[in-house]
Image (cartoon, rainbow, N blue to C red):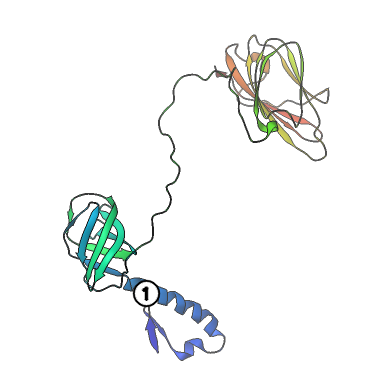
């Protein structure tokens, strides 16, 4: 009989096929016991700062040179801590070259535990608030594929514009006359989505056709007709084409 990590193991524990589960349990308990052996405390007063500091451990732990350790304030472990690499150990005397810290002041009671090397620095995001207007007449999106890149159509006057799976996914334009978007039928079971950011200057009509035929139009955002859009506001027009029809969604106008 033996006790590992507080769990008692006997020969009966491994009888028959029970040994399969018990071996895994024993391995986990052994790792837990080993981990506890690498934890100790220290009453050496030390400041929360970088540099080399020698701590006297309450119990001799076999840290080797080059091992990484973290020392935390026993009374405020998440507030004050230091992290570094072991540069020497003799008995209970532990020398640590501290390179990372959090908190401040003098700490007189430490918890010491083994840790690992510092990971790579992650990406940094810019913080802040952007104000002002975006000039969508020159705005475009770019992507890794030409069919996904943005495109400024400029003015859409009398006539029509063909929209296919190969058209840019996002397009920006100003409506200067009644205009038609003629959506080509996708091949096979293909489905494609296209988005238009349109400024309707004088309540012109925007008609969407599917292979030259009138299509059913669905409106969202409180709008009932694209021609009612304000003359100084942009609208988003989303087209979803499937093998038999195209759905059109128009949002509420937003000021330019």
Label 1: state its secondary structure.
Answer: helix
| In this rendering, position of residue 151 left or right of residue 42 | right
Left/right of residue 220 with respect to residue 93 in the rendered view: right
Please name whichever residue, 15 or 114, is drawn nearer the observer in this view of the structure: 114
Q: Say if 106 sits above or below 93 in the image.
A: above
Q: Quadrant of the N terminus?
A: bottom left
Tell me if residue 75 can be seen.
Answer: no
Counting every numbered tag in the picture gives 1
Q: Residue at x 39, y 73 (%)?
A: 32
Residue 19 placed where, x, y %? Answer: 53, 84
Report the residue at 70% width, 32% height from top: 147
Residue placed under numbered mark 1 in the picture: 34
With 17 as the anchor, is 57 left or right in this view? left
Q: Where does the C terminus fall, quadrant-wise?
A: top right
Quarter residue 190 falls in = top right
**Image position, residue 155 (x, y; %):** 67, 13
Give percent across and percent down for residue 192: 73, 34
Dot 1 crowding, Cα within 10 Å, few <14, some 14–19, many 20+: few
Asked where in the image residue 28 lies, by quadrant, the reply is bottom left
| Front position in the image: 120 or 188 | 120
* Residue 178 falls in image quadrant: top right
Q: Residue at x 25, y 52 (%)?
A: 50
- Provide residue 27's location: percent of width, then percent of height: 46, 77
Whether residue 198 is visible here, answered yes or no, is yes
């Amino acid at each position: 009989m033996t006790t590992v990590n507080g769990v008692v193991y006997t020969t009966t524990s491994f009888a028959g096929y029970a040994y399969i589960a018990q071996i895994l349990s024993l391995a986990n308990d052994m790792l837990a016991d080993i981990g506890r052996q690498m934890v100790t405390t220290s009453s050496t007063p030390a400041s929360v700062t970088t540099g080399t500091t020698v701590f006297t451990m309450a119990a001799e732990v076999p840290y080797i040179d080059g091992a990484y350790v973290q020392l935390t304030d026993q009374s405020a472990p998440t507030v004050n801590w230091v992290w570094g690499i072991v540069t020497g150990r003799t008995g209970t005397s532990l020398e640590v070259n501290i390179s990372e810290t959090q908190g401040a002041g003098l700490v007189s009671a430490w918890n010491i535990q083994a840790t690992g090397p510092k990971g790579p620095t992650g990406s940094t995001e810019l913080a802040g608030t952007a104000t002002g207007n975006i000039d969508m007449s020159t705005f475009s999106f770019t992507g890794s594929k030409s069919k996904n890149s943005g495109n400024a159509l400029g003015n859409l006057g009398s006539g029509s514009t063909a929209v296919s799976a190969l058209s840019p996914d996002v397009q920006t334009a100003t409506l200067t006359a009644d205009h038609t978007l003629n959506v080509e039928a996708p091949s096979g079971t293909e489905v494609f989505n296209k988005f238009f950011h349109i400024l309707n200057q004088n309540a012109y009509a925007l008609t969407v056709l599917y292979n030259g035929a009138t299509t059913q139009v669905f409106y969202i955002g409180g709008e009932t007709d694209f021609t009612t859009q304000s003359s100084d506001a942009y609208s988003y027009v989303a087209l979803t084409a499937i093998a038999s029809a195209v759905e059109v969604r128009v949002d509420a106008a937003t000021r330019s």
